């Protein structure tokens, strides 16, 4: 069994003359929730897409449980993008069937229980849902997989505070202790208490990384307060 669920070594990504990531190195260990933190445009989504195997690195390397990006790594990874990805003409029950077809590690029972908590009826159409409800549906589906790595890109960015509380509690209750999680957000105050580790990005580069408690002790303040000070415009 590999040591790290996700390993990034000198990871870089460029688009023409624009550098989205430059020399990013860190790892996500099993049983740890790592916050990928930074303002909008800092490279968080690019990094998560590289880890999910949706983009090809321009330099360096990324691996999931020692496996480079490809079909094998994608089978180990549960990925929640920062936008709605489900077809809106579907009903809730169709999305369960879709995930069951695609992912052998998907638990329909677990998903059905979470959807019942959300009061989402099986025959409900996605086109009738609010953006926040769609995001909760997608999270329930992603967290119903028994993956080795969970990649959550801004899971609370587009929902109201009450929905954020549900989403964060769902994350804590449902991810496997032998898995790692990389959670991207710029809303640091909302997730700070969940994080075991933190990686701060600015303009594609790592500003600070390490154990969340060590960062708090070193800086003499919480992660959100430090972020507001260092990343102030």
Image (spheres, rainbow, N blue to C red):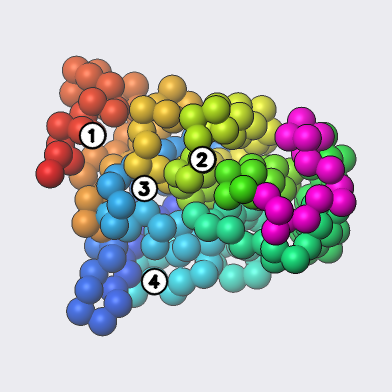
Circle 3 Cα neighbour tier, 10 Å, few/some/many (<14 / 14–19 / ≥20): some
Image: magenta residue range: 114-129
Query: How far, Cα to Cα, is label 1 from label 4?
Result: 27 Å
In the picture of the structure, the residue carrying the numbered disc 1 is: 227
Q: Residue furthest front?
A: 128
- Along the polypeptide, which appears first: circle 2 or circle 3? 3
Q: Is residue 21 above or below residue 150?
A: below
Residue 64 vs residue 66, the one in the foreground: 64
At horizontal 62% and vertical 48% (from top left) the residue drawn is 130
Answer left or right for 173 relative to 52: right
Query: How far, Cα to Cα, is label 3 from label 1?
Result: 19 Å
Is residue 186 at least partly visible in the picture? yes
* Percent of width and height locating residue 46: 39, 62
Answer left or right for 92 relative to 168: right
In the picture of the structure, the residue carrying the numbered disc 2 is: 159
- Along the polypeptide, which appears first: circle 4 or circle 2? 4
Residue 156 vs residue 64, the one in the foreground: 156
Circle 2 Cα neighbour tier, 10 Å, few/some/many (<14 / 14–19 / ≥20): some
In the picture of the structure, the residue carrying the numbered disc 4 is: 57
**Disc number lying in front (4 or 2):** 2
Query: How far, Cα to Cα, is label 1 from label 2?
Result: 22 Å
**Disc number lying in front (3 or 1):** 1
- Along the polypeptide, which appears first: circle 3 or circle 1? 3
Query: How far, Cα to Cα, is label 2 from label 3?
Result: 29 Å
Q: Which mark is residue 26?
A: 3
């Amino acid at each position: 069994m590999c040591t790290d669920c996700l390993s990034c070594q000198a990871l870089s990504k460029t688009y023409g003359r624009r550098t989205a990531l430059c020399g990013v190195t860190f790892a996500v260990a099993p049983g740890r929730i790592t916050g990928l933190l930074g303002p909008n445009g800092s490279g968080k989504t690019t990094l998560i897409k590289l880890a999910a195997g949706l983009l090809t690195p321009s330099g360096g390397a990324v691996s999931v449980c020692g496996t480079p990006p490809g079909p094998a790594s994608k089978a180990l990874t549960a990925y929640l993008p920062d936008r709605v990805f489900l077809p809106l003409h579907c009903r809730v029950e169709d999305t369960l069937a879709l995930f069951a077809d695609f992912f052998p590690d998907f638990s329909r029972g677990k998903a059905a229980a979470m959807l019942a908590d959300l009061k989402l009826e099986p025959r409900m159409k996605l086109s009738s849902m609010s953006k926040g409800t769609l995001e909760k549906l997608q999270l329930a589906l992603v967290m119903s997989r028994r993956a080795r790595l969970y990649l959550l890109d801004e899971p609370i960015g587009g929902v109201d505070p009450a929905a954020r509380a549900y989403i964060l509690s769902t994350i804590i209750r449902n991810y496997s202790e032998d898995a790692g999680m990389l959670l991207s957000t710029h809303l640091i105050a909302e997730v700070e208490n969940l994080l075991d580790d933190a990686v701060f990005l600015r303009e594609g580069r790592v500003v600070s990384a390490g154990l969340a408690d060590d960062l708090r002790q070193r800086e003499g303040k919480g992660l959100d307060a430090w972020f507001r000070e260092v990343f102030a415009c």
